[in-house]
Image: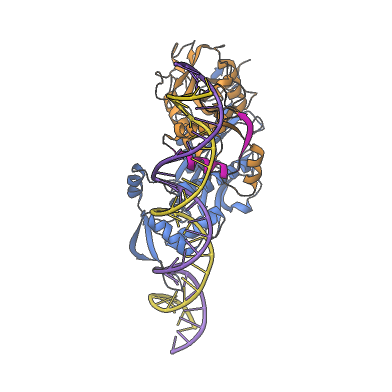
Chain colours: A blue, B orange, C yellow, D purple
Amino acid sequence: MSFTYEYARPAVTVDCVVFGLDVSDLKVLLIQRKLTPFQHSWALPGGFVRIDETLDEAARRELEEEAGVTDVYLEQLYTFGGLDRDPRERIVTVAYYALAKLSDHRIRAATDAMGVGWFGLDDLPKLAFDHADIVQRAHERLRGKVRYAPVGFELLPQRFSLTQLQRLYEIILGTDLDKRNFRKKILAMDLLVETDEVEQGVRHRAARLYRFDRRKYDRLTKQGFEFAM
Amino acid sequence: MSFTYEYARPAVTVDCVVFGLDVSDLKVLLIQRKLTPFQHSWALPGGFVRIDETLDEAARRELEEEAGVTDVYLEQLYTFGGLDRDPRERIVTVAYYALAKLSDHRIRAATDAMGVGWFGLDDLPKLAFDHADIVQRAHERLRGKVRYAPVGFELLPQRFSLTQLQRLYEIILGTDLDKRNFRKKILAMDLLVETDEVEQGVRHRAARLYRFDRRKYDRLTKQGFEFAM
DNA sequence: TCTTCTAAGTGTATAGTTTACACGAAGTGT
DNA sequence: ACACTTCGTGTAAACTATACACTTAGAAGA
């Protein structure tokens, strides 16, 4: 099948910045390119948008095909349309960011990728295209978003301790938080429910585990509640 | 000039939601389409992105060509990629929103538009394509943005009274604000400078005019200040 | 120039929120 | 039983947000 256009048109791709939370670091998932241009360079997972799929569908498809990533929180970030993004031709890319539970994923290289890996945000290799700009913008967005929407939970396991949650905010916001004040604030929102489980495999007193109650959050939101950290 | 691609690709357009502030209302600038599809319908100004222009450039060009709008605050909003947005072919549109000083513009119909007009947000005609969705999203974004960034000033003349500014926030946020508290808060930020001018042509005591000091804002921002209303 | 009208401009007290701060107890490992 | 580590908890002080009403400037018209 081939199509002819009267005027040259930009092509459309999607690229995804997948974040994962390590013990002490935010990580980004990168793939090593099998093909030119930027062969062997590290890059964001992504690719051309097909004529019969939406942008979100394209993003999820590429994530699965290139890195074996499924079931993540996914949100559109920004569309990059610089003239020289790609040396071959004019490409407009719709960038997404995703939040993954690091533990969940048996990530794997696939299809167009030679390898897949998690890299600390402050320890990224040189990236293909303008992908470093995209990562930076995704990081800024995450920092902003985490403060007024309960998206942080997407980076933690289903059940987590308050200390884990506090670490998450400290890592993303880059600040230290007071333990007592943090707990007071997050518990006062009444979005967490205490489970009857505790942390496993630690060599000290185990912390109680909580889970985020999304239904409660949706209900409160309808009543005008606004999440804020 | 014509180009052949092996696979069908989505085309890329830009569409702009231009906001303007009336005495008592937020208005949106619409154009009446001269061409099919949706001939004679009202729609957002916009059009195809050329191969040799960035997305921002395309948005500004279309604004000028179709509605005579120049020199506005312009920010990318979201990219819409639904499969059936356009009955002719698959089109991905990068939506922008713009803030215009309503008084400045001698808007005019041009090129691909039959007419141009400002419409109250609660009084929009039926719009072409998915443009109603785009307007809604732009409105939500503006409501959010105005609270943590000093963008509201883009809708007011260079010099404005505190009452005008308060009205702006009341209109965009949809709430009533207390006059004394509003003044205290905005003046405490130290972003406004008193001019030696007063309102003209009112039939009562004229209010002092202020202007927004962007340099001061930039300076304070670098020092960690965060705007919030 | 007096009167009327409209919006401008201004302060305080109270409630609520955010911050700073430290230690005893639980549980693990030796 | 002892050492070690993290858990879990309250209060006082500083700050911020809210509620609230009257006097005065200036324009317009009698």
Q: Is residue B164 left or right of residue A136?
A: left
The image shows residue A212 at horizontal and vertical percentages of 37, 54
Q: Is residue A93 above or below residue B107?
A: below
Viewer-closest of A81 and A189: A189
Viewer-closest of B140 and A212: B140
Q: Work out whether residue A124 can be spotted.
A: yes
Viewer-closest of B80 and A2: B80
The image shows residue B15 at horizontal and vertical percentages of 52, 24
Q: Is residue A22 above or below residue B15?
A: below
Q: Is residue B208 magenta?
A: no
Q: Is residue D3 above or below residue A150?
A: below
Q: Is residue A166 above or below residue B176?
A: below
Q: Is residue B184 magenta?
A: yes
The image shows residue B7 at horizontal and vertical percentages of 52, 25
Q: Is residue A74 left or right of residue A139?
A: left
Viewer-closest of B153 and A145: B153
Q: Is residue A206 left or right of residue A178?
A: left
Residue in the image at 44% along x and 11% along y: B40
Q: How many marks?
A: 0
What are the residue bounds of the magenta stretch? B176-197
Residue in the image at 48% along x and 54% along y: A102
Q: Work out whether residue A109 can be spotted.
A: no
The image shows residue B128 at horizontal and vertical percentages of 43, 19
